[in-house]
């Protein structure tokens, strides 16, 4: 039995926080492997990257999610008791509930609502002088997803509810005030979402057939019981929060159009080019660094022993940048996706494997739809200048974003 290369540090949590997205890949490169063991949060942890590792990681016979995600991420990002931490029949049931919301027509409907928001906002941008794309798109997505999900959101509440969603996204991998902002935002958002669920259940708030609120509030689990109100709130936020997070990908798309201006022409002319561009944005830019699980029962793989209960991290960013899967991985080259059939274990910005039976992101099609519409809006409906600003991506910060949030000046309607 080969022994897994060991990163000899008493605990690497601080190194992970310092090094960010490159933490796993740098060590894999150093040891010449796609696997090593280290200690994180004082626990031995096996780190993996690459296609074979992703195929292994998404084998639910070998891994469980209960106890995988650190508590601090559950108390901010996902909420405690979310689908992310379930296994077996309970996970299948909850996941089927979420996937039932994501029909192709529902996905298109949210795309149209987002387009409407963009169009409605353009006159304001024209008057504004300079706008911060991230903040604008986050609020537009919050309004669109609430309307789509059947969740009432007063105009006066848009800014603070969106700020809470952003704080949840920003706080899971943070320490200090950034983390505590996320904890407070989780508390506020839970109270709000639980009240919406209560009103939907009492009939005081009629939610449209098929909407996320209607489906989640009315859901009965695999034993026939309604979801506890707190859990229903967690899952409702599991739809709202990550939709707002798509604003980050929209910023990355704007950054890519800025850095690679010839793609501005290409995506205007041809639908396949847009699809390739969107896939490359999802592959290239750093968003979700890694997924976490625990070994369900001991097994051996490629000559390495995985003991029961061991925490395992799959490097999503490192797999999306693995030189064996992606020639010239550090170059932004959308054409790499031309004619390329999907591979459930190579392109994993939103997890790998199967959407229904595994933990792969149920919002992947929605993300692609929203990003596609944003790219169309940035290239055909809107003209703008990119004033001098700090657009550098700090890979040691998770999640990262250009510090400016992407400033646009002199915005005009063009279509
Ligand atoms: C902003 C872009 C997004 C990114 C980068 C992203 C990324 C991810 C990742 C990496 C996972 C975990 C995969 C795993 O644990 O193996 C995940 C799971 C999940 N995502 Fe997304 N996601 C995005 C958008 C969305 C959207 C739009 C929704 C819903 C509207 C959504 C809802 C979820 C849920 C509920 C899960 C848990 C699934 C499960 O555990 O079975 N995400 N996402």
Image: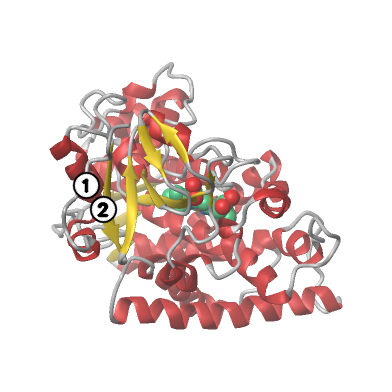
Tag 1's secondary structure? loop
- Residue 224 is left or right of residue 68, and the answer is right
State the count of labels. 2
Residues tagged 2 and 1 counted as in contact (Cβ below 8 A): yes
Residue located beneath label 2 in the image: 38
Q: At which x and y percent is residue 247?
A: 41, 56
Q: At which x and y percent is residue 206?
A: 82, 70
Q: At which x and y percent is residue 25?
A: 23, 42
> Which residue: 38% across, 23% down?
337
72 relative to 5, above or below: below
The numbered mark, 2 or 1, whose residue comes first in the sequence reads 1
Q: Is residue 250 visible?
A: no
Tag 2's secondary structure? strand
Q: At which x and y percent is residue 169?
A: 41, 65
Query: Which of the pair 10/3 is nearer the observer?
Result: 3
397 relative to 249, above or below: below
- Residue 25 is left or right of residue 287, and the answer is left
- Residue 203 is left or right of residue 15, and the answer is right
Query: Which of the pair 170/404 is nearer the observer?
Result: 170
Residue located beneath label 1 in the image: 6
Q: Is residue 319 visible?
A: yes
The N terminus sits in image quarter: top left
324 relative to 237, above or below: above
> Which residue: 35% across, 29% down?
303
Label 1 Cα neighbours within 10 Å, binned few <14 / some 14-19 / many ≥20: some
Q: Residue at the far top: name it.
A: 339
Q: Quadrant of residue 277?
A: top left
Whole-Å distance between the Cαs marked 2 and 1? 6 Å
Q: Is label 1 within 8 A of ligand 1 (CB to nearest ligand atom)?
A: no
């Amino acid at each position: 039995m080969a022994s897994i290369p060991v990163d000899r540090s008493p605990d690497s949590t601080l190194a992970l926080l310092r090094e960010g997205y490159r933490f796993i890949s740098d060590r894999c490169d150093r040891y010449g492997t796609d696997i090593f063991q280290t200690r994180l949060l004082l626990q031995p942890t096996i780190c993996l990257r690459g296609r074979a590792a992703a195929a292994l990681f998404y084998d639910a016979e070998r891994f469980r999610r209960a106890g995988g995600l650190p508590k601090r991420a559950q108390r901010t990002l996902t909420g405690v008791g979310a689908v992310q931490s379930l296994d077996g029949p309970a996970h299948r049931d909850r996941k089927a509930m979420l996937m039932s919301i994501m029909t192709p027509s529902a996905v298109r409907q949210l795309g149209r609502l987002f387009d409407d928001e963009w169009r409605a906002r353009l006159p304001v941008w024209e008057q504004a002088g300079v706008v911060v794309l991230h903040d604008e798109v986050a609020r537009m997505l919050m309004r669109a997803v609430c309307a789509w999900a059947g969740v009432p959101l007063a105009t006066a509440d848009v800014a603070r509810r969106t700020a809470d969603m952003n704080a949840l996204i920003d706080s899971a991998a943070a320490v200090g005030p950034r983390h505590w902002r996320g904890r407070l935002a989780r508390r506020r958002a839970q109270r709000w979402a639980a009240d919406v669920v209560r009103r939907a259940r009492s009939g005081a708030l009629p939610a449209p057939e098929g909407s996320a609120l209607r489906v989640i509030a009315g859901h009965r689990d695999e034993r026939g019981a309604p979801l506890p109100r707190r859990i229903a709130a967690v899952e409702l936020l599991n739809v709202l929060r990550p939709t707002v997070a798509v604003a980050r990908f929209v910023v990355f798309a704007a950054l890519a159009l800025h850095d690679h201006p010839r793609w501005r022409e290409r995506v205007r002319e041809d639908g396949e080019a847009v699809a390739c561009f969107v896939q490359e944005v999802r592959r290239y830019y750093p968003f979700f660094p890694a997924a976490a699980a625990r070994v369900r029962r001991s097994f051996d793989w490629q000559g390495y022993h995985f003991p029961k209960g061991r925490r395992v991290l799959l490097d999503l960013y490192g797999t999306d940048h693995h030189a064996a899967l992606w020639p010239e991985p550090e170059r932004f080259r959308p054409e790499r996706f031309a004619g390329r059939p999907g591979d459930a274990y190579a392109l994993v910005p939103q997890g790998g494997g199967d959407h229904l039976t595994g933990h792969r992101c149920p919002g992947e099609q929605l993300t692609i739809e929203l990003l596609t519409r944003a790219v169309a809006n940035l290239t055909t409906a809107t003209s703008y200048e990119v004033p001098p600003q700090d657009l550098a991506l700090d890979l040691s910060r998770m999640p990262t974003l250009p510090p400016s949030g992407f400033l646009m000046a002199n915005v005009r309607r063009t279509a």
